[in-house]
Image (spheres, helix red, strand yellow):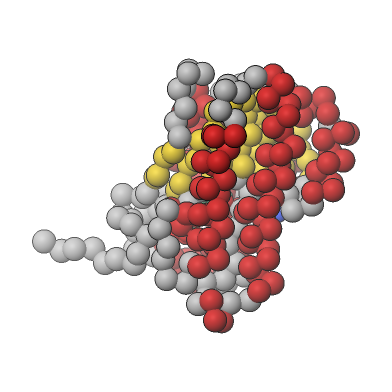
Amino acid sequence: MSVFISGASSGIGEACARVFAAAHHDLVLVARREDRLQKLARELHDQFGIRATPIALDVRDRAKLEVLAQTHAEVFQTVDVLINNAGLAKGRDVIQKGRPEDWDVVIDTNLKGLLYVTRAFLPLMIQKRRGHIVNIGSVAGQWVYQNGNVYCASKFGVRALTESLRYDLHGSGIRVTEISPGMVKTEFSQVRFGGDQEKADAIYAGRTPLTPLDIAESVLWCVQRPARVNIQELVIFPTEQPGVHPTAPVVR
Ligand code: NDP
Ligand code: 8X3
């Protein structure tokens, strides 16, 4: 069995690669930054003796994905677990000041990219009558917050697709799980704020966010349940984040 992880070059995806490698699963690692994937694949192979295949792919590129499904058919065939993790936010403005070119990137990556990748694996999993799709959603897909707009909409969409997949795949033996994290310390905020480190740091100031490992271990736990058990959804917040809305600690 091997595990396909989109967005494996950083953050939650990279942590998933590490925990699944430690559990002795082969990996297919996908992202745009190939150098990072190659380094990670080498490291995990050396450390755990697993086969890790790095593949440079922009999940928005449907044509390339179709080619890869042919050129890497042998590797794709071995995939039993698909972790749809690649995703991002861009900007945090009110809609009236938002940049439509950012909206395109967010929607094309978080929604259409997830659909394209999932579509590439479904016929194989259906044929094998086995598989597990884990979609990394967000608490932003459960509740909106101020200035979250398009990112929230994309993650609400991930939630809708996850639920739809369960109905569409009913009877196939394929499990579908959504993990919805709150604040996790990754490159997410740097990307969201276009590399502005000060703005990114401010998001986590004064509280302890989740680590990528916290999420990766939860993904592994879901996958390791017996085949009859489907963890449909996990919502995971940091202890110091009671909800998606801005808060100050209550002093008693
Ligand atoms: P990071 O920015 O650290 O990682 C994002 C990953 O997605 C990178 O590996 C990046 O790789 C990849 N990626 C982005 N765009 C594409 C693309 N077009 N094609 C292929 N890969 C892509 O952030 P996180 O680890 O935090 O984010 C992972 C997921 O978790 C996202 O879906 C995010 O929405 C979600 N999430 C994050 C939370 C947080 O607080 N951090 C909370 C809730 C959910 P590369 O740039 O090399 O392509
Ligand atoms: C990322 C978490 O709260 O920044 O999905 O939207 S949040």
Q: Position of residue 89 (x, y in %)?
A: 58, 62
Left or right of residue 239, residue 222 in this image: right
Residue in front for this viewpoint, 69 or 183 = 69
Residue drawn at point x = 55 percent, y = 53 percent: 157
Residue 109 visible, this orientation? yes
Q: Position of residue 86 (x, y in %)?
A: 63, 49
Residue drawn at point x = 65 percent, y = 47 percent: 114
Left or right of residue 38, residue 98 in this image: left
Q: In which quadrant will I find the N terminus?
A: top right
Relative to 99, is 52 above or below? Answer: above
Residue in front for this viewpoint, 12 or 132 = 132
Q: Which residue extends farthest bottom?
A: 97
Residue in front for this viewpoint, 20 or 177 = 177
Q: Position of residue 72 (x, y in %)?
A: 84, 32
Relative to 191, is 139 above or below? Answer: above
Q: Where, by quadrant of the figure, is residue 166 drawn?
A: top right
